[in-house]
Image (spheres, rainbow, N blue to C red):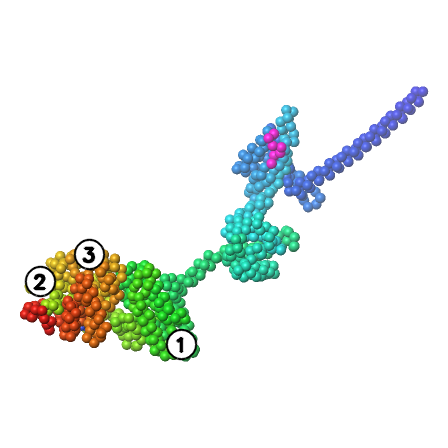
Amino acid sequence: MAAETGLVIAVAMALLFAAACIAVAQRARAARRAVARLQERELSFRMALWASGQRYWDFHVPTARLRYLVAKHDGSRSYDFSSEEADPAAVIHPDDLPGVVDTMHRHVAGETPEFASEHRVRADSPVSTRGDWVWIRARGRAVEFNPDGTILRLAGTSLDIGRSRAVERENRIASEVLRSMSEAVAVLDAQFRFLSVNPAFARITGHDAADVTGRGAAVLDSLEHDPSSGRAMREAVARDGRWSGEMWQRQRNGEEFLCAVEAATVLGSDADGGRMYVLMLSDITLHKRAEEELRYLANFDALTDLPNRSLLAERLSRAIVRARREGSRVAVLFLDLDRFKDINDSLGHAVGDRILRAVAARLQQAVGHGQIVARLAGDEFTVILEDLAVPEDAERVAREIIMAFEAPLLPEDGQEVSVSASIGISLYPDHAQVPTELLKRADAAMYQAKAAGRRTWMRYDDSMETAIRRRATLAGALHKALDRGELRVVYQPRQSLASSRITGAEALLRWSSPEHGEIPPADFIPLAEENGMILEIGEWVLREACLAQRRWREHGLSDLTVSVNMSVLQLLRGDFAEVVRRVLDDTGVPPQALELELTESVLMANATQTAQKLQAFRELGVSLAIDDFGTGYSSLAYLKRLPITTLKIDQTFIADLCHDREGASITTTVIAMAHGLGLVVVAEGVENEAQARFLAQHRCDEIQGYWVSQPIDAMSCMAFIHNRQLAAGQRAGAVGAP
Ligand SMILES: Nc1nc2c(ncn2[C@@H]2O[C@@H]3COP(=O)(O)O[C@H]4[C@@H](O)[C@H](n5cnc6c(=O)[nH]c(N)nc65)O[C@@H]4COP(=O)(O)O[C@H]3[C@H]2O)c(=O)[nH]1
């Protein structure tokens, strides 16, 4: 029994042992399976961590220690973890640290469901491997809590976002650039339908994004200028990958504008092979207009719209080339307005400009619209005549131009004004072969036309070159003439027709140059006016004349008037009235004994301005005479507005008096009308008794001319006057011969 019991126990023990062994083996197997599963999971975790590029981190709140876990891969199936601890303050960029701490605090305080932050960390920290500082995105949440529910530990992952941030930044910059670009930019799909546009696109085309998205680019196609150009551009860019050029495009409101277009193919990610197009448009309408304006300014005269010097040179060159080929002739007509400077100075530049415009129109009308008329400068115009049959044809045109100016001009302001022109003509191939020489020769001929009395034309001949050179030499010599004592003043007496008494004398300037001989004032006064020397010379003449007058008065000739010519420059520049007052003071001559003569052209036109200037002389008590009356543009009605006292009829009318009915009737009319205005009338250039008699019959007041006396020096003049006063006293009332 005991044995049996022992056996049973032994069997039971064995069974128990076996069962225990089985259980142990099973547990061991289960444990191994669990370990294997754990290892598998950990490997997966490592692989996932490695593959995602993320780092694992956890943060122990009480100690503020940060632990990282980084998965490393050696290329085989082994993925290792490395674990490091760090002080967050040493790893996180100091600028970002406060933000990170704040985010952490808010999560720890339960304000946010998770911790999420983008910040920079040190590159050599376990969370990064590149650069000094790298951007990471860290996410995590509380994973362990204290018994009181507060957070003990946070865990999460972090990802190096440096590269994506750079891409994002680039994208942001690119879109900002697009937004701020002044060119319109549009992205189109493979069918040239708008995908997106920038703000400048809306500004330039009037179509905003909502308006065009999904619509075809044909919405911009021009309807007016070149309707097929849009399609052609799209075909070209689809075929060649890019297109650039200028084309007209249509705005939303239908207006068309000229654009510089750049179109290019880009590869996108949408359908149709991902092909997209970028279109860049810049509005160049204004730019184009400015360019055209510049081209116009470079070739045309802005005042008259006529071709300018440079375009003239080009057209003349072409005309010469053609004439050479065809064996024909070209004429250059160089036209200069007579005394335009005076008109300009007296009327003011605004009126001067209007007159020039009217001259340009009259000139073009006179020569016909097929001929080239250009404005060179100021009042200088040029006409090119091609295909001349004979040289005389050029002269015929010149004559027609001069006649065309016979009728007064009516500039835009409505005030009538008469101008005349002097014209010089040169011919290809007769006088020169190249444009510059032809122009020079025509200019030289024009100067001769002026010297010949203006309002006429001259054809170039070689002797004119000599005349031009002489002018230049004289201008140089004139500068020294005053200092060298080469100038002197002579006096031409004036006689009353009623009493035969000498009423005064006109001071006339003379220049005797040791090198050039006796030079007439008509040659050197214009030179002195051109270079401004007339101011100095004019004052000197005035002083000389007043000194002579004082001497005459000292010798008992007290009722004489001395006349002095005044140039337009003296009237308009400086304060000549003050100069006159000073000279009268210095010489002790009473103002009533002085008369100032101004040529009609000086006085013409701007009556108000001239009248004001002249009033200053009248206030001094000086008399004013209008010289060369009849050669200029004024009318007697106009004279009414000027404070003048004397009118001198130009000698050309007097010369014609006895054999030209017209001259005679002009003279008698002028005398009658001048008397009506209360003016003293003096006839100039009286050379014979017949003229004097005619003038006396028509009640002309005084005469001046060779019949009375040649201009003579001051002493001779005094002697002459003494003798004549004596004789006149004996024959009072008669028209006495000198
Ligand atoms: N054919 C002919 N001519 C006669 C006769 N009697 C006088 N003459 C000339 O006619 C001109 C009259 O002077 P003007 O009309 O004031 O014309 C003057 C005047 O406008 C200007 N001039 C002369 N001296 C001066 C001056 O000191 N200052 C200014 N600004 N101009 C002056 O030069 C012009 C020419 O002066 P001149 O050569 O001295 O010419 C003078 C005179 O010598 C005549 O019977 N027959």
The tally of labels here is 3
Lower position in the chain sequence, tag 1 or tag 2: 1
Of helix, strand and loop, which one carries label 3?
A: helix
The response on whether ligand 1 sits within 8 Å of label 3 is: no
Residue furthest to the right: 1
Name the disc covering residue 387, or none: 1
Of helix, strand and loop, which one carries label 2?
A: loop
Residue 110 is at least partly visible in this image: yes
Residues in magenta?
A: 110-116
Q: Which secondary structure type mostly characterizes the magenta part of the structure?
A: loop
Measured in 3D between alpha carbons, the distance from the residue under mark 3 to the one under mark 2, in whole angstroms, is: 25 Å
For residue 445, what is the image quadrant? bottom left
Name the kind of residue labelled 3 in the image.
Ala
Q: Position of residue 598 (x, y in %)?
A: 21, 63
- Dots 1, 3 in contact, CB < 8 A: no
Of 229 and 264, nearer the camera is 229
Report ligand 1 position as a quadrant.
bottom left
For label 2, the residue is: 558
Q: Residue at x 31, y 71 (%)?
A: 402
Name the disc covering residue 616, or none: 3
Q: Position of residue 157 (x, y in %)?
A: 63, 37
Q: Residue at x 43, y 78 (%)?
A: 326
